[in-house]
Image (cartoon, coloured by chain):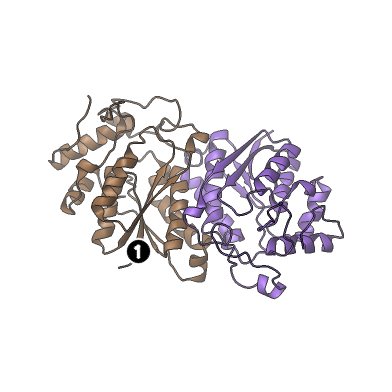
Chain colours: A brown, B purple
C-alpha cells in the first residue's frame, strides 16, 4: 500500500476525502493543525476520525495563526449567523484565515516528503464555498506545481507530488452521499465554527447551515445535535 | 512608506536582503521561525538585526519542524564539516529541511496579507547553494504565482504579491559587499549550523565555510570568532 498524507480537520469534508483516499488503497498519514481556531474541539473529532479510518500515523501540528489574526476563526471577530444563501455565495467571508490552506499544505508537504508519500489529499470544496480563494481548482493546480519545485524528492524525481481534492466539484449533499457509501461515521465529525461552551454546534454559522442543508438534500439524517 | 515583510533568520543573507528592502524605501515587518533548529541562537541574532534595522514589528513564529525530522538541522543527523568545494556544489545537502522555505513563505504570506504588505523579501541565494531546491529562481516565481491565487487580497486585487529575492544571483562575496555598502553590521549575524555549547561558530560547516570564504573574497574581515 502506498502512503498518502491526508489533511484532517475533524470536519465532514476532510473525513470524506480521507475515506476516498483509503478507498483508493492508500495507507493514511493524517495531519491536523492546532492553529488557535475558535472551534478547537474539531481536533478531538479529527482524532476520532483518524482512529475510525485506521490511519498509520496522526500528527497534530501546533501553529499559532492568532499571531496574525484578521479572521473570525482566529481573532475577536463575530462569526456570522443565519446568513442567506445569497450572502453566503457572494464574496470572501470573514471566516477566511489569511493563507491558511497554504500554510497547512506546506506542512503537509513537509510531512509527505519525510514519509515518502507522493499523494496529498484534502477536502476542499469549491461549490459551497466559492468564497475561499484557497479552495479553488486553479489554486490546487498551482500548489501541485510548486510542491514539485520546492522539494528534494520533487526535484530529484523520487516522488511526483500530486494534490488530490476529490470533493472539489461536489455539492455538500454529494459529499455526504459519497462518504455514506464509503462508511464514514459522520457522528464522529465536527463542523461548527462557533460551538457553545458546552460543545454543542450552533446550527446557524455558515458551516452548520451548509452541513444541515447538505444532509437534508441528501435525504439523510445529520447525527449531530444543534443548539438552535 | 510601503510595508514589506522580510524573512529574517539572523544569518548574513537575510540581514542583507532586509537592508536592501529598507534601502528601497520599505517599512519593514520581520518574521523569524523557531522551528527546532540546532542553531537556535540565530534567533537572538535575528532580534539584534531587526533592532539595528529599525523594523516596525518583529514576529517570531514557533513551528516545530522536528516533528518531521529528516534533516541535520532538525534531527540527530551530523552536520557535515570541512567539505570540499566539489562536495558542496553537488547534490542536495543533509542540512536540507523538507519544504522549509515553503512553510516559511506561507507564514510570511499570512503575515503580509494581514499587515497589507504586497512585498516579501527573502535572502535566498542560488549560487552558493545550488543544492537547495527552494532557493532557485523557478521556485520563487512559482511561489509568487501561488501567493496571488491563495489569498483574499491577491484574488480581490487589493495587493499584488511580489516575492523579492534580491541576492539570488549574487555570490557570497558580492552579498557581503552589497551589505557593507548598505551599512549592515555583520557582527550581529549568526551563520553556523552547529555552534559549540558556548555559542562559538564551528568554522567548518558549509555555512561557516561559505561565509569565511565570502569575506576573504570580498577582501573584508569577518567580525565573528570561530572555534576552528
Residue at (60% x, 47% y) in the render: B162
Residue at (26% x, 62% y) in the render: A24
* Residue B31 placement (x, y as % from top left): 61, 42
Answer above or below: position of A174 versus B59: below
Residue B110 as seen in the image, left or right of residue A96: right
Q: Chain of mark 1?
A: A
Front residue of A109/B78: it is B78
Q: Quadrant of residue A126?
A: top left
Answer above or below: position of A104 versus B207: above
Which quadrant: the N terminus of chain B? top right
* Residue A136 placement (x, y as % from top left): 38, 47
Answer above or below: position of A80 versus A156: above
* Residue B65 placement (x, y as % from top left): 51, 52
Q: Which residue is mark 1?
A: A3
- Helix, strand or loop for disc 1: strand
Q: Residues within 10 Å of mark 1 (few under 14, many from 20)?
A: many
Can residue B128 be seen here? The reply is: no
Q: Quadrant of residue A121?
A: bottom left
* Residue B74 placement (x, y as % from top left): 55, 57
Count all numbered tags in the image, as a single digit. 1
Residue at (54% x, 43% y) in the render: B62
Which quadrant: the C terminus of chain B? bottom right
Amino acid at each position: 500500500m502506498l502512503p498518502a498524507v491526508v489533511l484532517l480537520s475533524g470536519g465532514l469534508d476532510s473525513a470524506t476525502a480521507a475515506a476516498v483516499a483509503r478507498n483508493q488503497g492508500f495507507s493514511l498519514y493524517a495531519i491536523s493543525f492546532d492553529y488557535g481556531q475558535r472551534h478547537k474541539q474539531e481536533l478531538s473529532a479529527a482524532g476520532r476520525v483518524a482512529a475510525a479510518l485506521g490511519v498509520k500515523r496522526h500528527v497534530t501540528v501546533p501553529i499559532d495563526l492568532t499571531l496574525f489574526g484578521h479572521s473570525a476563526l482566529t481573532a475577536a471577530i463575530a462569526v456570522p449567523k443565519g446568513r442567506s444563501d445569497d450572502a453566503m455565495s457572494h464574496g470572501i467571508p470573514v471566516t477566511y484565515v489569511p493563507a491558511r490552506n497554504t500554510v497547512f499544505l506546506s506542512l503537509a508537504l513537509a510531512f509527505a516528503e519525510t514519509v515518502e508519500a507522493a499523494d496529498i489529499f484534502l477536502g476542499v470544496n469549491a461549490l459551497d464555498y466559492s468564497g475561499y480563494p484557497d479552495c479553488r481548482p486553479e489554486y490546487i493546480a498551482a500548489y501541485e506545481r510548486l510542491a514539485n519545485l520546492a522539494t528534494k524528492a520533487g526535484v530529484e524525481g523520487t516522488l511526483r507530488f500530486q494534490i488530490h481534492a476529490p470533493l472539489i466539484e461536489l455539492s455538500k449533499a454529494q459529499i455526504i452521499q459519497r462518504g455514506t457509501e464509503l462508511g464514514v461515521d459522520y457522528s464522529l465529525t465536527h463542523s461548527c465554527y462557533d460551538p457553545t461552551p458546552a460543545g454543542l454546534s450552533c446550527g446557524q454559522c455558515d458551516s452548520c447551515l451548509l452541513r444541515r442543508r447538505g444532509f437534508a438534500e441528501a435525504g439523510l439524517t445529520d447525527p449531530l445535535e444543534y443548539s438552535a
